[in-house]
Amino acid sequence: MNSPSTSSARSSSNPRARKSFEVNPFRKYCLLNGFDDIGLTLRHKDKIAAFEAQRLATKPWLAHTLSS
């Protein structure tokens, strides 16, 4: 028998009862498409790569500023 601390509480006697709730449209879009913060950013990877290439061409001194 489950103790009160380990049993799951239910607000309805029907375990299949449906509850409605609001979801922000942008969050819904992310949930339905499986996007997290990184996934949202990677949708623009072509634009990011183009920007980085253009930045490197115009500012080559920034190419090796990070140490490995």
Image: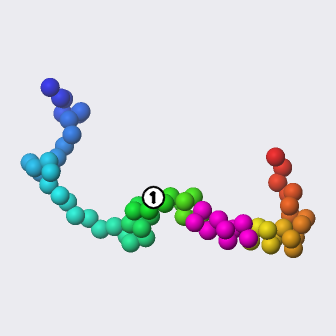
Q: Residue at x 18, y 29 (%)?
A: 3
* Among the 4 quarters of the image, the one containing residue 62: bottom right
Q: Position of residue 53 (x, y in %)?
A: 79, 68
Residue 32 image point, x, y percent: 39, 62
- Quarter of the image for residue 28 reads bottom left
Q: Is 19 on the left or on the right of 57, as rendered?
A: left
Residue extending furthest front?
Answer: 46
Residue 23 relative to residue 45: left or right: left
Q: Amino acid at mark 1?
A: Gly
The crowd level at tag 1 (other Cα within 10 Å; few <14, some 14-19, many 20+) is: few
Could you say which quadrant of the image residue 56 lies in?
A: bottom right
Say which residue label 1 marks: 34
| Membership of 63 in magenta stretch | no
Q: Residue at x 54, y 64 (%)?
A: 40
Q: Could you say which is closer to the camera, residue 27 or residue 44?
A: 44
> Residue 33: x, y in percent?
44, 62
In the image as oriented, which residue stretches furthest toward the right?
A: 61
Query: Does 37 sit above or below residue 16?
Result: below
Magenta highlight on residue 47: yes
Number of numbered discs on residues: 1
Vertical arrangement, residue 31 with respect to residue 25, above or below: above
Q: Which residues are magenta?
A: 42-50
Q: Position of residue 2 (x, y in %)?
A: 18, 29
Please name the predominant secondary structure of the magenta segment in the image: helix
